Amino acid sequence: MAAKRQIKAGLYTTEERARRDHSGWTLVQGILAPVQFLVFLVSAGLVLRFLATGEGYGAATLSIIAKTVVLYLIMVTGAIWEREVFGVYLFAPVFFWEDVVSMFVIGLHTAYLVALATDWIDARDQMILALAAYATYVINAAQFLLKLRAARREAGEMSGVAT
């Protein structure tokens, strides 16, 4: 007989919330997310500088590679976190749309790496591709921030504290 799934009163069941709160991967995600955002800000500035002046291709390229490495790291550790909290590596119902958009983010970052490695497109178009990847990243980051805000609001309501 299949185990009954607890009905959710919000984003998390009581068990999921407990697993989330006790997971070391929650802290990892909490550290990697702002690191990724800082790398993104620096990189976006370098990419825009290159597009405006034609200078700094090497620095912009290294920054995009760094952003992509951090993205891969946060995606792998995030999948482990999702498995630990929800029992699936990706597409847990509560994070379904965030994970869908994350696949586009990863796809565009990976396309940039392919373009870089193969000279499939010129330097300017590589930077435009990176900006497209960054635009989807911003959308995805906003999704996760909204979900974090909802989780905090939910936690506040459960504890009787207004947020």
Image (cartoon, helix red, strand yellow):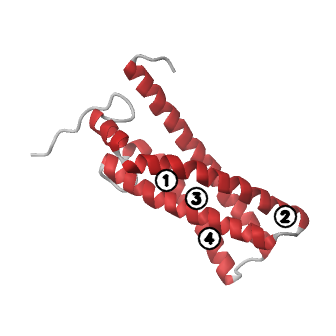
Label 4 Cα crowd, 10 Å radius (few <14 / some 14-19 / many 20+): some
Q: Residue at x 29, y 33 (%)?
A: 14
Left or right: 37, with 95 as reference point = right
Residues at marks 4 and 2 touching, judged by CB atoms closer than 8 Å: no
Residue type, numbered disc 2:
Leu
Looking at the image, tell me whether mark 3 or mark 4 is earlier in sequence order.
3
Looking at the image, tell me whether mark 2 or mark 3 is earlier in sequence order.
2
Vertical relation: 143 (above or below) 124 = above
- The residue singled out by tag 1 in the image is 100
Q: Residue at x 47, y 30 (%)?
A: 152
- The residue singled out by tag 2 in the image is 51
Label 3 Cα crowd, 10 Å radius (few <14 / some 14-19 / many 20+): many
Label 2 Cα crowd, 10 Å radius (few <14 / some 14-19 / many 20+): some
Q: Nearer the viewer, mark 1 or mark 2?
A: 2
Residue type, numbered disc 4:
Ala
Left or right: 102, with 95 as reference point = right
Looking at the image, tell me whether mark 4 or mark 2 is earlier in sequence order.
2
Which type of secondary structure does the marked residue at label 3 adopt? helix
Vertical relation: 66 (above or below) 31 = below
Q: Which mark is residue 105?
A: 3
Q: Which mark is residue 163?
A: none
> Disc 3 versus disc 4: distance between alpha carbons?
10 Å
Q: Nearer the viewer, mark 4 or mark 2?
A: 2
Residue 78 drawn at (x, y percent): 44, 54
Residue type, numbered disc 1:
Val
- The residue singled out by tag 4 in the image is 111
> Disc 3 versus disc 1: distance between alpha carbons?
9 Å
